[in-house]
């Protein structure tokens, strides 16, 4: 860059790679004895790459994602999102109150003599089956202490009653001829037992056979 002198003023032209900026700085040549007020004009010089980020950064680019192993320093400088494969994969989380109906630890059984002192209620028609509404005070079930209101009845002795209508499920208990009747319950609600995440028929059949 070769400076050009015009009288008492200095003129310079700077050409940048990405753009051309003409910067004129006037600095009056003052005599030592001059009492004139000094005039200072400041011109800010920008870096070579200033302005490029704004030019290339658009909402679509900011929202874009790059493979982690392809990340470069310019990607970080531009602010482009870089995500690993692990971070982009979404993992659905189970609800806080979810109870796995294919986990044997979520089932309880009780061996009771009649009268048991259990009040049953039928689930919504779309699910079927019955559950414990309440326990009679001082009844065998309350004294035994294993059954709780809300438990879903799934088996009577070795017979599966899950999903049965109210009369059929209760009839199985009434018809049981053993001195004590074993009742198997799922400790969860009807959606968790019969809904989309409920136990499969094969799993439940095998579990009851082993219980």
Image (cartoon, rainbow, N blue to C red):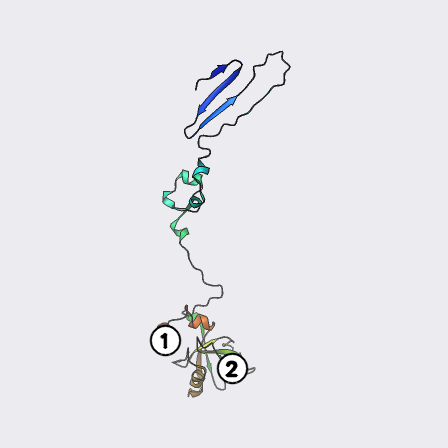
Per the image, label 2 sits on a secondary structure element best described as strand
Please state the horizontal and vertical placement of residue 150, each as a whole percent of the image: 50, 75
Q: According to the image, label 2 marks what residue?
A: 119
106 up-or-down from 33: above or below: below
Query: Could you tell me if the residues under marks 1 and 2 are in contact, i.e. CB atoms within 8 Å?
Result: no
Circle 2 residues within 10 Å: few <14, some 14–19, many ≥20: few
Quadrant showing the C terminus: bottom left
The number of numbered discs placed on residues in the rendered structure image is 2
Choose top left, top right, bottom left or bottom right for residue 16: top left
Please state the horizontal and vertical placement of residue 37, each as a whole percent of the image: 63, 18
168 up-or-down from 42: above or below: below
Please state the horizontal and vertical placement of residue 72, each as a whole percent of the image: 39, 40
96 or 147: nearer the viewer: 96
Circle 1 residues within 10 Å: few <14, some 14–19, many ≥20: some
191 or 149: nearer the viewer: 191
Q: Residue at x 38, y 50 (%)?
A: 85
Tell me how far mark 1 sits from mark 2, CA to CA: 25 Å
Please state the horizontal and vertical placement of residue 27, each as a whole percent of the image: 55, 18
Which mark is first along the chain, 2 or 1? Answer: 2
Tell me: 207 left or right of 33. left
Quadrant showing the N terminus: top left
Q: Residue at x 36, y 75 (%)?
A: 205
Marking on residue 30: none
Which residue is farthest right? 35
Choose top left, top right, bottom left or bottom right for residue 163: bottom left
16 up-or-down from 156: above or below: above
56 up-or-down from 143: above or below: above
Q: Residue at x 39, y 52 (%)?
A: 86
Per the image, label 1 sits on a secondary structure element best described as helix
Q: According to the image, label 1 marks what residue?
A: 205
């Amino acid at each position: 860059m070769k400076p050009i002198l015009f009288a008492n003023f200095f003129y310079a032209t700077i050409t940048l790679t990405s753009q051309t900026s003409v910067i004129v700085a006037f600095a009056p040549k003052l005599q030592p004895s001059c009492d004139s007020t000094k005039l200072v004009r400041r011109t800010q010089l920008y870096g070579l790459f200033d302005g490029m980020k704004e030019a290339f950064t658009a909402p679509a680019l900011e929202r874009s994602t790059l493979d982690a192993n392809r990340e470069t320093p310019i990607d970080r400088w531009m602010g482009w999102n870089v995500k690993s494969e692990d971070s982009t994969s979404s993992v659905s989380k189970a609800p806080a109150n979810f109870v796995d109906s294919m986990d044997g630890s979520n089932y309880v059984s009780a061996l009771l003599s009649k009268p048991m002192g259990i009040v049953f209620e039928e689930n919504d028609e779309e699910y079927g089956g019955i559950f414990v509404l309440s326990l009679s005070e001082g009844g065998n079930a309350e004294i035994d202490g294993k059954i709780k209101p809300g438990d879903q009845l799934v088996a009577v002795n070795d017979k599966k009653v899950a999903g049965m209508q109210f009369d059929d499920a209760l009839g199985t208990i009434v018809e049981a001829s053993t001195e004590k009747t074993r009742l198997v319950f799922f400790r969860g609600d009807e959606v968790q037992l019969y809904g989309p995440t409920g136990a499969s028929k094969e799993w439940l059949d095998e579990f009851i056979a082993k219980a």
